[in-house]
Amino acid sequence: MIKAVIFDCFGVLSTEGFRVFCGKYFKDQPRKRAQAQSLMDLHTLGNLAYEEFIDSLAKLAGQKSETVKDYLHSNKPNEPLFDYIRDDLKPKYKIGMLSNAGDDWLSELFSSQDLALLDDVVLSFKFGITKPNPAIYELAAQRLGVKPIDCVLIDDIVRYCDGARAVGMQAILYEDFEQMETELEQLLKGRSGVGS
């Protein structure tokens, strides 16, 4: 029985400025794109401070730090998804966020009303582990007070969905709001027993 729905942040609960930045400045440069991802990984593990991450990414792209910040701060909340969480999911399910993310962004990106919809937030930098490490999925379920088998993860990265499935969670690959809503409703009707 599904008791909890866990959402990724960037690319699901919000837009993804880092991906847009890399697409623009490292489009045909796989080596630099990989270096940028390595910088992001260090930051999301808590091993590279925010300003150092920004400065390193700017240097790699040959841009000013302010340009990098403009892209990264261009993330916007996915308002239709937050409306759906508030109106349809929150009354029936525990709601979590699981994100490979560094510090210094959560309260800037989301309103206090949006954050209040989340029963728990697991950010990789706080725990030193990232998706797809099985331990982070298990931690997210544990902090919500449920077993992994009682959770569904919504993420926009295939390997992160696969990681969730490896610990027994259901997973939906997020493409857009309408697709996710349809798949989630089908899953919840089939496995949740809500209303019975």
Image: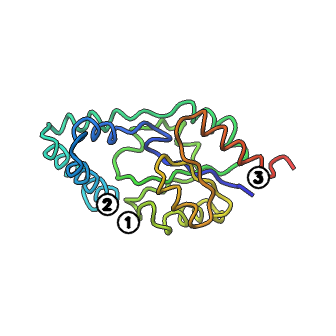
- Give the mark nearer the N terminus: 3 vs 1: 1
Residue drawn at (41%, 54%), measured in percent from left and top?
100
**Neighbour tally class for label 3: few under 14, some 14-19, many 20 plus, Cα within 10 Å:** some
Secondary structure beneath dot 3 equals: loop
**Mark 3, mark 1: which one is toward the viewer?**
3
**Neighbour tally class for label 1: few under 14, some 14-19, many 20 plus, Cα within 10 Å:** some
Residue type of the residue flagged with mark 3: Ser
Label 3 – label 2 distance at C-alpha: 36 Å
Q: Is residue 100 above or below residue 62?
A: below
Q: Quadrant of the N terminus?
A: bottom right
Please state if 44 lies on the left or on the right of 50 as rendered.
right
In the rendering, which numbered label is found on residue 192? 3
**Neighbour tally class for label 2: few under 14, some 14-19, many 20 plus, Cα within 10 Å:** many
Residue 11 x, y percent position in the rendering? 45, 41
Residue 5 x, y percent position in the rendering? 62, 50
Secondary structure beneath dot 1 equals: loop
In the rendering, which numbered label is found on residue 6? none
Please state if 106 lies on the left or on the right of 192 as rendered.
left
Residue type of the residue flagged with mark 1: Gly
- Give the mark nearer the N terminus: 2 vs 1: 2
Question: Which residue is identified by label 2?
Answer: 46
Residue type of the residue flagged with mark 2: Gly
Residue drawn at (64%, 57%), measured in percent from left and top?
151
